């Protein structure tokens, strides 16, 4: 789970270490307000109600587990965020409540990104240009096509961060920039080659094929139905 997403969840939940919150539908513990329904799942790590209430690290780990559990079930971070709050999405009221919660979390994530991206975000500017030999799909003659790519890629450290950025983009939040997971040794040459391949047109053509103006158009054959147009005029 992306750290920025976890921080956003904590800010929206607004719980405190050492606090438990009694509600009509259950008891919730600590900063991430972990529901008591998760105690059987979390018992394997020794996370009891008392631990979740008083141990900040355990509470964060439990929050990450719940969020990852829903993401695994839904294969969608946005729905996972909504289900973190409402559990199931089986009624219109729950769906509406989930959407309100999603909006709050995404707003927090965007603020975090805006605050820290200028100094903490790694970027890669891609600029490349060169000729490539292709075959015109109209006249079938080979010609040199100049390819140009220009853009900026955002580099993230984990797949979870990449999924979070994709989720933000799906909600219309965050910058419209392509992101990729960067290893310690990034294959820049391979990356540029991929960008150039993506820039190749599906069906390359000359702007004007050689000899286009020199070949006369073939005579039009008369339509076999032309003789029918005079029928019925007498």
Image (cartoon, grey):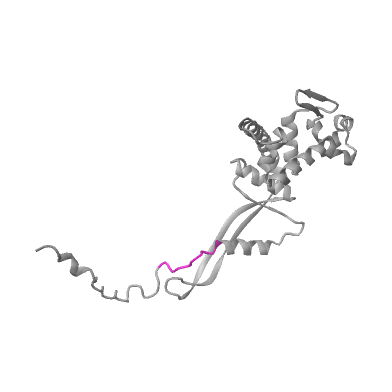
Q: In the rendered view of the protein, which quadrant contains the N terminus? A: top right
Quarter of the figure with residue 174: top right
Please identify the dominant SS of the magenta region: loop
Q: Is residue 149 left or right of residue 116?
A: left
* Residue 201 or residue 207, whichever sits in front: 201
Given residues 67 and 109, the one toward you in this image is 67
Q: If the image is split into quadrants, where does the C terminus sit?
A: bottom left
Give the farthest residue toward the right.
46
Residue 2 position within the rendered picture, expressed as x and y whole percent measured from the top left:
74, 44
Residue 25: x percent and y percent? 75, 26
Which quadrant of the structure image shows residue 102?
A: top right
Is residue 109 left or right of 30 when viewed as pictured? left
Q: Residue at x 19, y 67 (%)?
A: 228
Relative to 190, residue 98 above or below? above
Identify the magenta region: 199-207
Residue at x 88% of width, y 41% of height = 44
* Count of numbered circles in the view: 0
Residue toward you, 143 or 140:
140
Query: In percent of the image, x 68 and y 43: which residue is there?
Result: 77
Give the answer, above or below, for where 85 lies relative to 155: above
Vertical comparison of 150 with 136: above or below? above
Q: Position of residue 195 (x, y in %)?
A: 60, 61
Horizontal side, residue 183 vs residue 211: left or right: right
Residue lying farthest to the left in this orientation: 234
Quarter of the view holding residue 226: bottom left
Q: Is residue 20 magenta?
A: no
Q: Is residue 206 magenta?
A: yes
Where is residue 110 shown, x and y percent of the image? 66, 38
Which residue is nearer to you in this view: 61 or 226?
Answer: 226
């Amino acid at each position: 789970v992306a750290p920025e997403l976890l921080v956003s969840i904590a800010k929206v939940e607004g719980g405190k270490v050492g606090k438990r919150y009694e509600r009509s539908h259950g008891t919730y513990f600590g900063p991430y307000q972990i529901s008591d329904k998760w105690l059987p799942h979390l018992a394997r790590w020794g996370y009891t109600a008392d631990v979740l209430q008083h141990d900040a690290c355990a509470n964060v780990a439990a929050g990450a587990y719940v969020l990852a559990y829903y993401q695994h079930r839904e294969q969608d971070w946005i729905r996972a965020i909504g289900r973190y709050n409402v559990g199931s999405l089986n009624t219109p009221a729950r769906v509406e409540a989930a959407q309100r919660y999603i909006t709050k979390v995404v707003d927090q994530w965007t603020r975090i990104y805006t605050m820290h991206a200028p100094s903490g975000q790694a970027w890669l500017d891609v600029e490349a240009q060169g000729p490539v030999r292709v075959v015109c799909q109209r006249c079938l003659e080979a010609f040199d096509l100049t390819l140009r790519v220009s853009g900026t890629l955002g580099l993230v450290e984990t797949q979870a961060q990449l999924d979070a950025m994709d989720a933000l983009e799906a909600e219309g939040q965050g910058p419209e920039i392509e992101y990729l997971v960067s290893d310690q040794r990034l294959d820049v040459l391979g990356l540029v080659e991929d960008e150039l391949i993506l820039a190749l047109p599906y069906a390359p053509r000359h702007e004007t094929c050689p000899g286009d103006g020199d070949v006369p158009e073939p005579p039009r054959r008369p339509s076999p139905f032309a003789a029918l147009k005079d029928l019925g005029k007498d």
